[in-house]
Amino acid sequence: MAPQILRAHDRTPAPWKNGGGITTEVLAHPEGAGTDDFAWRISLADVATAGPFSAFEGVDRIITVVEGRGMALTVDGTEHIIDTRYAPFPFSGDATTDCRLLDGPLVDFNVMTRRSDAKATVRIERASTRLEPSPGTRVLALVLEGTATLADITLDRLDAVLLEEDAADIAVDGVLAVVSLTEVR
């Protein structure tokens, strides 16, 4: 199956589940799934003010600061300072989570997987790399900064590519988030 290119300009922002901010979905599975019935969901969020995160029962989350100075996340009463760009932070969507902005608004990259359906890992690449889905795994790569080139296709900032079967080499001139999504059987 050919790589699926997901352009940033084709996405439509929507309110968060709790109404506290704006999210822009990159891709969800199954296609057309909402916030209550996805197996996995990848998105970008604009966080302009402090406040609670939406609760997602049975979901694991990985959040990565893309723009801004960062945040203090209090997850089930324990504070975590997330102040380094491009450093993925995993936590449970079941947890009571509150956000305090460290110095103004930010944009974060979110990967959410329903435990009964999928699991995910996120790695950050700053050089050319190989995207190689194994059986039962999809790989999504999203340009966080700069550009990336896959074959003769240039991906600009916040563009993404999804690979379901065939491996591909990708040249990175910036920062790339690589998400591996594995089905739970």
Image: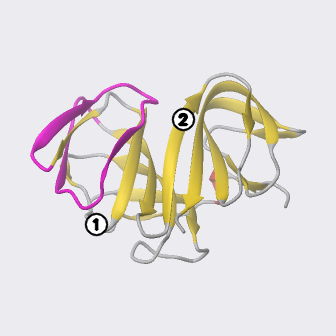
How far apart are the alpha carbons under marks 2 and 1? 29 Å
Give percent across and percent down for residue 13.
Answer: 49, 61
Give me the residue at 51% from left, 45% from top.
121
In the picture, measured across the screen, residue 60 lies left or right of residue 77, that is right
Three-letter code, disc 1: Gly
Q: Nearer the viewer, residue 171 or 7?
A: 171
Give percent across and percent down for residue 162.
Answer: 70, 53
Q: Nearer the viewer, residue 89 or 32?
A: 89
Give me the residue at 85% from left, 57% from top.
2
Q: Which residue is mark 1?
A: 19
Q: Nearer the viewer, residue 99 or 97?
A: 97
Q: Quadrant of the N terminus?
A: bottom right
Quarter location, residue 68: top left
Element class at badge 1 = loop
- Total tally of numbered discs in the picture: 2
Q: Which residue is mark 2?
A: 123
> What stretch of residues is rendered in magenta?
76-104
Q: Residues within 10 Å of mark 1 (few under 14, many from 20)?
A: few
